[in-house]
Image (cartoon, rainbow, N blue to C red):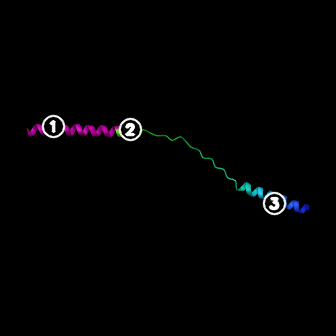
Amino acid sequence: MANNIFRTALVFILFGFVSMGCQTSHEVEMKPVEIKPIHITIDVNVRVEKALDDFFDDLEAAEDEIKE
């Protein structure tokens, strides 16, 4: 009888060790995301496009004056 209790206790102890080995835990850290402004590039492109439009409008106006 004592031998049977010893075997049962041994099985429970081994099961405890095995189940502890299967336990996992993970910790995920989320750092704040930094979003940099994009409008700077867009402003530069719009300014360049406007300057080119003004330049070519001046050329077209001069061309029209020459034709007349």
Label 2: few (<14), some (14–19) or many (≥20) C-alpha neighbours in 10 Å: few
Question: Which percent across, then down, holds residue 4?
Answer: 88, 62
Q: Are marks 3 and 1 in contact (CB under 8 Å)?
A: no
Question: Which percent across, then down, holds residue 49?
Answer: 28, 40
The prevailing secondary structure element of the residues shown in magenta is helix
Residue at the spot x=67%, y=52% of the render?
24
Dot 1 falls on a residue whose secondary structure is helix
Label 3: few (<14), some (14–19) or many (≥20) C-alpha neighbours in 10 Å: few
Residue at the spot x=14%, y=37% of the render?
62
Question: Mark 3 — residue?
Answer: 11
Question: Which percent across, then down, holds residue 12?
Answer: 80, 57
Task: Give, as a single range, the part of the protein colored magenta.
Answer: 43-67
Membership of 42 in magenta stretch: no
Membership of 55 in magenta stretch: yes
Name the quarter where the N terminus is drawn: bottom right
Residue at the spot x=40%, y=40% of the render?
38
Residue at the spot x=27%, y=37% of the render?
50
Residue type (three-letter) at the residue carrying disc 3: Val
Q: Nearer the viewer, mark 3 or mark 1?
A: 3
Q: CA distance from mark 2 to mark 1?
A: 33 Å
Question: Mark 1 — residue?
Answer: 61
Judge whether 33 appears above or below 17 on screen.
above
Residue type (three-letter) at the residue carrying disc 2: His
Q: Nearer the viewer, mark 3 or mark 2?
A: 3
Q: Residue placed farthest to the left in the image? A: 68
Question: Which percent across, then down, holds residue 21?
Answer: 72, 56
Q: Quadrant of residue 31?
A: top right
